[in-house]
Image (cartoon, rainbow, N blue to C red):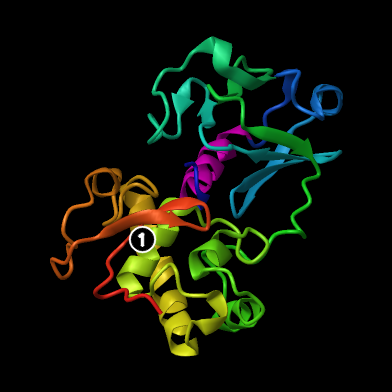
Amino acid sequence: MPEGLEAELYRRSAEQAAGRRITDVTVYDHQEMAMEIRTALPGHRFTSVRRHGKVVTLDLDDGPSLGLHFGMTGRLVVDGDAAIAELEYSSGRDDPAWNRLVITFDDGGTLRINDPRRWARFVLDPDLDRLGPDFLDVTADHLVAAFARRRTPVKAALLDQGVVAGYGNMCVDEVLWHVGISPTTPARDVETDDVERLVEFAPGHLMTMLQLGGSHRGTITPEVRAAVPPCPQDGAPMRREQVGGRTTIWCPVHQPDP
């Protein structure tokens, strides 16, 4: 967390910044482009807000764009209102000491990134070309072609932001569980019909999760991840193991290993 769904919630919240003139910028010094950001933004206005994968981009009226990546624990707060009150696996506190970016507007309002772990990243003119298609727009043809070259588990392939941008650990487990694909299946061995089912199912289900609050609002909730109860679909014992270096939850009955 945050995954692509949380980034979409942040994008919607950041739209409140559009049209407001920037008067001051404070950036945590560990950011590689801290000085450039401090110099480029004051005096300008954000004209539009975009999202691709987990990156939210704010365009300036005359100058570079500002790209925001929230890491695992970064939260967006606009005019004192947090787009997400509390992230799973993070703190719900809004400690001023955790502010890593503060943009102040001429009306006195602010846009802030508050991050206890300092993993959020801010860059000018983010390179989005290195990312694959957005996870809500990716096509079956793209995934079939991308998977054909990969021996890695399908879960690892979906988490590769160069293959598809926006998926995180929880959403990948969620959609694979629903469509019945084992996360350990080598990507190149996933049948085309299964890829098509995944692409057809995922956007609608993920948007439902978004409306409910984000990537923790599916069937494979944080509580399920912690307790590993019987599978809600077939009652079989679920598994929790490391797949592609990430903790993974799945059902070996309706998601059989290859």
Figure quadrant of residue 46: top right
Viewer-side residue, 232 vs 151: 151
Q: Residue at x 39, y 52 (%)?
A: 210
Tell me which secondary structure the magenta stretch mostly adopts: helix
Depicted 229 relative to depicted 93: above or below: below
Depicted 130 relative to depicted 257: above or below: above
Magenta range is 5-17
Secondary structure under tag 1 reads helix
Residue 225 x/y as whole percent: 30, 48
Depicted 1 relative to depicted 127: above or below: above
Q: Specify few, some or many for label 1: CA neighbours under 10 Å numbering under 14, 14-19, or 20 or more.
A: many
Viewer-side residue, 146 vs 48: 146
Residue 179 x/y as whole percent: 34, 75
Residue 195 x/y as whole percent: 48, 81
Residue 41 x/y as whole percent: 80, 27
Viewer-side residue, 41 vs 69: 69
